[in-house]
C-alpha cells in the first residue's frame, strides 16, 4: 500500500475521531441568557435539572438590555430570562420568541443597601433624606436608561419625590451585580439592588425596602427563542415554571409570579 493511501486512511481516521457523533452533540445543554440577578438561583436550577440526567444548561448572565441586544444581533441562544417585561417585549416585537412559550417566571423586591462594615437604616418614604445619608459619597444604581434594576430604582425615587436630590450623585453599574459590587467595596455609601442580590452578599446590609407601589411590578418573564435548536430547551423552560423549579427560585428569595 502506498504512503499516499496510508496517509489518506490516517486522515479519515482522525476526521471521524474528532467529528462529534449526534449523541455527543446533543449532550450540550440549552444556552440560557438570563438577567444578572438570577445567577445563584439559575445555577441551582441547572444543577437540579442535570441531576435528573439531563445535559446541564449553559448559562450566560448580563443585564437584560445587553442580552436583548445580543438576541437581536443573532445570538444562537435557546432561552431568554429578562428582569423586566420591557426587554422581553422588545425581543417579542422583533419576532424572535417562539409563540406560546412566554410566561412570567418569578418576582422580586427592590431594596436600598449599605456596606456591611458601615450599616445604616433609612425609612423608605416620601421625602426621605437619602441625599443627606449619602454624605460625600454616591448612590450606586444600574443604568436607569436601560437596565431594569436602574429603571425600577429611578421610578421609585421619583415616586418618593427624591430623584432630583441624587440624580447628579450616581455611580452607575452595567448591571445590578456590578452595582452591588460598588457597595460591597465601599465605593458607594448606598445602592439600589434587588432583594435577592442583597441576600446573596455577606458584604452588604439592607438599609430599607422600597414600597411595591413606588415602581412597576418586578417580573421575570421567560421565553424560548426562535433561534433555539436544542431539544431540551423546552423541557428546562417547563422545569423552571414547575413546582420543583419554583421552589428552587423561592429558596433564593424570588417570589412566585
Image (spheres, rainbow, N blue to C red):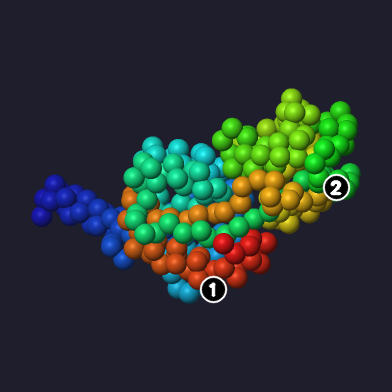
Quarter in which the N terminus is drawn:
bottom left
| Residue 32 shows in this picture | no
Q: Label 1 neighbourhood size at 10 Å, few (<14), some (14-19), many (20+)?
A: few
Picture coordinates of residue 181 (x, y %)?
72, 42
Picture coordinates of residue 59 (x, y %)?
50, 54
In what element is the residue under mark 2? Answer: loop
Residue ID at (77%, 34%): 162
Q: How many marks?
A: 2
Quarter in which the C terminus is drawn:
bottom right
Picture coordinates of residue 99 (x, y %)?
34, 56
Comparing labels 2 and 1, the label whose residue is closer to the camera: 2
Residue ID at (46%, 51%): 80
Residue ID at (67%, 37%): 154
Residue 48 versus residue 224: which sits nearer the camera?
224
Q: Which mark is residue 243?
A: 1
* Spatial CA span between label 2 and label 1: 35 Å
| 242 w.r.t. 254: above or below | below
Q: Which quadrant of the figure has residue 93?
A: top left
Q: Label 2 neighbourhood size at 10 Å, few (<14), some (14-19), many (20+)?
A: few
Residue 91 versus residue 201: which sits nearer the camera?
91
Residue 63 versus residue 214: which sits nearer the camera?
214
Q: Which mark is residue 177?
A: none
Question: Which label's residue is closer to the chain start, 2 or 1?
Answer: 2
Q: Which mark is residue 123?
A: 2
Q: Residue furthest top?
A: 168
Q: Which quadrant of the figure has residue 190?
A: top right
Q: Are marks 2 and 1 in contact (CB under 8 Å)?
A: no
| 208 w.r.t. 250: above or below | above
In what element is the residue under mark 1? Answer: helix
Amino acid at each position: 500500500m502506498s504512503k499516499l493511501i496510508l496517509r489518506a486512511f490516517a486522515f479519515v481516521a482522525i476526521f471521524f475521531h474528532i467529528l462529534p457523533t449526534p449523541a455527543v452533540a446533543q449532550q450540550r445543554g440549552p444556552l440560557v441568557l438570563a438577567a444578572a440577578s438570577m445567577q445563584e438561583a439559575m445555577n441551582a436550577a441547572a444543577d437540579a435539572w442535570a441531576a435528573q440526567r439531563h445535559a446541564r444548561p449553559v448559562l450566560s448572565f448580563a443585564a437584560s438590555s445587553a442580552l436583548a441586544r445580543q438576541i437581536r444581533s443573532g445570538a444562537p441562544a435557546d432561552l431568554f430570562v429578562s428582569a423586566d417585561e420591557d426587554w422581553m417585549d422588545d425581543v417579542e416585537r422583533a419576532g424572535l420568541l417562539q409563540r406560546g412559550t412566554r410566561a412570567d417566571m418569578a418576582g422580586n423586591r427592590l431594596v436600598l443597601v449599605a456596606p456591611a462594615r458601615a450599616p445604616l437604616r433609612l425609612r423608605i418614604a416620601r421625602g426621605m433624606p437619602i441625599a443627606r445619608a449619602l454624605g460625600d459619597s454616591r448612590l450606586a444604581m444600574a443604568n436607569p436608561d436601560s437596565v431594569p434594576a436602574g429603571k425600577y430604582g429611578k421610578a421609585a425615587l421619583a415616586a418618593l419625590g427624591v430623584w432630583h436630590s441624587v440624580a447628579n450623585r450616581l455611580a452607575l453599574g452595567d448591571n445590578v451585580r456590578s452595582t452591588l459590587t460598588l457597595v460591597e467595596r465601599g465605593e458607594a455609601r448606598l445602592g439600589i439592588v434587588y432583594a435577592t442580590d442583597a441576600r446573596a452578599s455577606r458584604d452588604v446590609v439592607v438599609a430599607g425596602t422600597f414600597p411595591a407601589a413606588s415602581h412597576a411590578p418586578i417580573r421575570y418573564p421567560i421565553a424560548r427563542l426562535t433561534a433555539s435548536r436544542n431539544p431540551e430547551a423546552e423541557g428546562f423552560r417547563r422545569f423552571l415554571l414547575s413546582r420543583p423549579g419554583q421552589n428552587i427560585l423561592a429558596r433564593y428569595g424570588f417570589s412566585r409570579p
